[in-house]
Amino acid sequence: MFKNRKKSNSDRTQIIKIIMLVLLTISMLFPSNAASAVEEPIKGKDILFIYDEDLSIKGKENVAVIADILTYMGYGTSYRTVNESSGMLDNFDSILFYHESDSVSSTFLEELESTSCKIMMVGGGSPDEILETLKLDYSPLRLRESVVKISYKVGHRETETALIKADNAIMFQEDFRYSSGQMEAMGKSSPLFVRGQRFTCMGVFDNESEILKAALSEQISIWKWPFDNEPNSYPQYIIFDNVYPFFSNERLMQAVRLMDRKGIPYSITVMPVYQNTEYPAMKHFCEVLSYAQSKGASIILKAPLINTEKPSLEDINKRITTAIDAYNKYGVYPIAIEAPNSWIHESLGMDVLKRFSTVILYPDKKNSWSDSDGYNTVYSDGHHLIAPAVLSNSSLDSNLIKTYPTALFLDINTDIENLEEQIEQIQQSEVSLRSLWLTKHTVYTNDRVVSFRDGILTVNGKVQSMEFKPFTYPEKFDFNRGIIGKMAESMDRENKRLLVIVTVISIIFIIFIAIARYQNRKRFLFKRTSEQGSDGGKVE
Amino acid sequence: MTLADILSLYAIIAIWGLMLINVVLSIGGFIYYIRVNRTDGRIPLKEYPMVSILVPAHNESIVIRKTVQALLNFDYPKDKYEIIVINDNSTDDSAEVLKNIQQKNPDRKLIVINTDSVSGGKGKSNALNIGFSVSTGSVIAIYDADNTPEPNALTLLVENLMADDKLGAVIGKFRTRNRNASLITRFVNIETLAYQCMNQAGRWFFFKLCTIPGTNFVVRRSIIERIGGWNTKALSEDTEISFRIYRMGYKIKLMPLAVTWEQEPQLLRIWFKQRTRWAKGNIFVLKENFKYVFDRTAGPMRLDVLYYGLVYILMLTSLVCSDLIFILSILGYTHVTLSGFSSTLWIMAILVFVLNVLITLAVEKNEFNMQSALLILLMLFTYSKLWVLVVLNALIQSATDAIFKREVKWYKTERSIETNNEHGGDS
């Protein structure tokens, strides 16, 4: 029997060896194909975003913001400079061109002429050559370093206006089949957006203007929409940001009751907690969160703060695992992560985000975008991205964006009356409100999979109840701090005591000094006067 | 909690603890000073005892003339005291200088013992034992060779000793004669007043405890005989003898009106060597006597041993920790995360330190001024740090002496020639 088994093992090994040899031979026969599959990022996705070779600083910032808008809108985007885009135009039906210079390379123009793709120009560069290539008879007016008044009506809202100091702008005086918005400069006016045949142009763009960002995203969504009706609208999500475990439970409870009364869907972003999660403060905090969760609030985990020089993915994942576990223990289930916007451009950030299907982005450092991948990689990871809202100049609680899902962050520290006013204003918004509980979410940690779909939340496949049950607390909690911990804990209090002691000591000492000076004057000065300077025995 | 947090916490608690102890001692010392200053300190006796003044001197020709002259000028009955100078294996012209003084004062009892390298040259304790062997007084007074005591010092010390049978010794106050000579002597002057005189006064006020300072004190002859003289192995013979006197049940009193002026090291190098010897001596005494902290029969001496323990263990380690963390924080290697660890804490500590020292200067004549206040601040960041180095050096030397079984070597402080204008602090 043993002999037979030995023989069968030997046969199996032989078979495995043969299979491996065949696979190796095949892979050696097609080396170039395999390599090109890795190196070639062109996947013929939705939009080819091209830009000039030499951009101004402002131009680079604008490109970064537009690239982010395309990602938020859920378009797979390939990034290229004009020269790099050679040979690629045919793969795309939509080209977004950020152009601020006077001319365009002839190769690009030839390629553009030979394709049927539509092109949208942004950046205020000269469109003359492109218009000529597309055989469009328009005579644009090019403005440099001028102040431009913008008017634009986002959706069915009232018209928003803004003044822009633009380095480059393009104005068209002719009538177009499609135009939108208005721009005025140097006594002339022109539509902000014009479209003729396959050519679309945005007259001016500035990443610091909220209205222009909203206008661009709306026009891109129309530009890309294949039907005659309005493009899809996306909702906004109300999020109470940066809620800490040491935040006043009463205050949090007031906000929860208000939202419940108003019937508004909302989320609470909680800070990750790694230590002392068994302390009563954390338990009380989670009790309120659990109550809020049972009343329809969804919980989001704030991304861990990275403050080390060389952070490791393993370490961050470990911290997230600890934080998720800390909340799950109390029946609170974070179903998404709130991360800095820059994470969608950094490989470490994207690796961390891979464990969350839903990602809420908050604005952080500027100009963090780079096109090193040549592609908006985070898009291919299939996240449900929720971007920061773009707020109206006229009303800070009014979100201008419905072309992609947005997060409207509210401050939990706002007093309850103001919060109520804000909520009422948000309710008037054209952008619909939505609950995170209406979509699917998955969170992976080192030790669990938290999944929500069809109204059921599971942890590692086990269904979890979202019903609120009041917590019980021990009468006296043992903090188990040890002598050193207790001393450290009481240092703040001791500081105040010490301040009182030092004040008392200082007063006593100052009184003592006064007494001593008085006595010395009596002993030496008066004595010296009467005894003509006798020094009480100094020996010379 | 990180290691830096734990060490910081330790340093804060230790430094503040010691500071509050010093504040309490200063309050006691101040009250005692004020009380004494209202009197002339005298307790006239029916009959004054015979006093033997011992002056150990090794190569002290620069200062010995002034010292002996001051001793001869005491207002104590001339026939009731003798001066015994132990010219201990000197290689300078001390013997000649002393002979001259003897010749000029034929009517006074001035004994000079010249020792050689066989009988002498083995340190202060050995010299004192030699002097003691020829002394006749029932009270022994000790003065260092660089001292110029005020004329009433001996009378005050002896009267106070004889007025109370429970007193084993009475110590006076010593001041810095050359305080204006250099920055280091200015620091020493402040340190002497604050941490030796005022501190001693506080300890006497609360616990009837004082440590003999090595000079300007009187002790009963019977006590020296009972304890078998000075311990020649101790570098800090004064502290050592104090502990032995405590153990016999006697008290040691401070009489701040009995003043002597002494010369302090003017150079950092000399100061460092002198202080290292003191620290080594005190470490030796602490090591020998620490067991008494746990001995209930040792009486109030336990407090004094504990006090030395606090200074040499708690203060040293806490200062090392806080300085180390401060440097590492600046270099960016560590940071303290304690929530209450604020700069207010350190500012308050500095304020208490400055006021604590200022109060002792306020009691003295011509010491309380803005210059002194600024010097105290400067002292905190320079002189105090040097103290840490001194003790660390002493610890290393003590450890190597113990490991290699080296005999302790008595370092004699080098003297400086003084000019007239730097003489005496109260001109």
Image (tube, coloured by chain):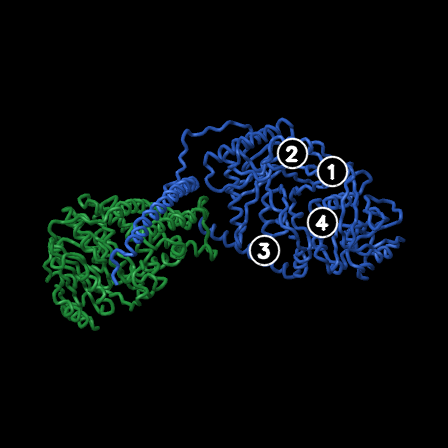
User: Residue visible at 61% across and 49% down?
Assistant: A343
Q: Is residue A412 above or below residue B31?
A: above
Observer-side mark, 2 or 4, equals 4
Q: Judging from the image, what secondary structure is the residue with disc 4 in?
A: loop
Q: Which quarter shows the C terminus of chain B?
A: bottom left
Q: Which residue is mark 1?
A: A233
Q: Chain ID for label 1? A: A
Between A265 and B379, the residue placed more toward the observer is B379
Where residue A19 is drawn, which disc sits there?
3
Cβ–Cβ below 8 Å for labels 4 and 3? no
Cβ–Cβ below 8 Å for labels 1 and 2? no
Amino acid under label 2?
Ser
Q: Which residue is mark 4?
A: A207
Image-based side of A456 in relation to A246, left or right: right
Give the mark nearest the N terminus, 2 or 4: 4
Observer-side mark, 3 or 2, equals 2
Between A8 and A180, the residue placed more toward the observer is A180
Q: Chain ID for label 2? A: A
Rendered image quadrant of residue A84: bottom right
